[in-house]
Image: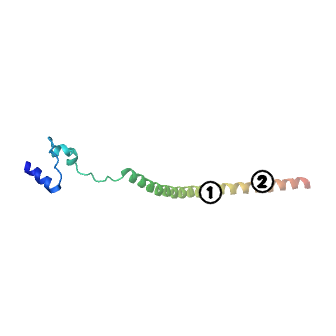
Amino acid sequence: MREVDSVAKESTGQPSRPVPRFVPTLTEVVDPVGVNRLPTPAEPKVDGLIELARLQVQSQLERRVEQVLYRLVGELIAKRWSTISADLSQEVNDLIANAVRDALAQQGTKQR
């Protein structure tokens, strides 16, 4: 041991450090739990992907619903309009016929 001390002293010019009484083992220095654990791959941001997909599907769904509603409302109005316009036409014709009859009746009473 003296030779090692003298060699260390000669090579550096200073006395070597004293050897510690307790030297920790490798398992005490390194956390064994951390050594056995492999790095986990980055998990995809599932919540973000779900939200992005929901927004894309929602906008497409809203456009499709709007198209279907416009078509259905258009068909309903077209069907109802033909019925309503026929009814209104008949009512207008009846009103005109009644007005002409009343006017003729009033003229006939005035002429007598």
Q: Residues within 10 Å of mark 1 (few under 14, many from 20)?
A: few
Identify the image quadrant of residue 112.
bottom right
Q: In this view, does 64 lie above or below 21?
A: below
Name the spot of residue 27 as percent of width and height, x first: 16, 44
| Mark count | 2
Q: How crowded is mark 2: few (under 14 residues within 10 Å), some or many (20 or more)?
A: few
Helix, strand, or loop for circle 1? helix
Q: Nearer the viewer, residue 34 or 18?
A: 18
Name the spot of residue 96 as percent of width and height, x first: 76, 56
Name the spot of residue 21 as percent of width and height, x first: 14, 41
Disc 1 to disc 2: CB gap under 8 Å: no
Helix, strand, or loop for circle 2? helix
Mark 2 belongs to which amino acid?
Asn
Q: Mark 1 points at which residue?
A: 81
Mark 1 belongs to which amino acid?
Trp
Rendered residue at 82%/53% (across/down):
102
Name the spot of residue 32 as percent of width and height, x first: 19, 45
Q: Earlier in the sequence, mark 1 or mark 2?
A: 1
Q: Mark 2 points at which residue?
A: 98
- Residue situated furthest top in the rendering: 21
Rendered residue at 50%/58% (across/down):
63
* Residue 13 as seen in the image, left or right of residue 55: left
State the CA–CA distance, disc 1 to disc 2: 25 Å
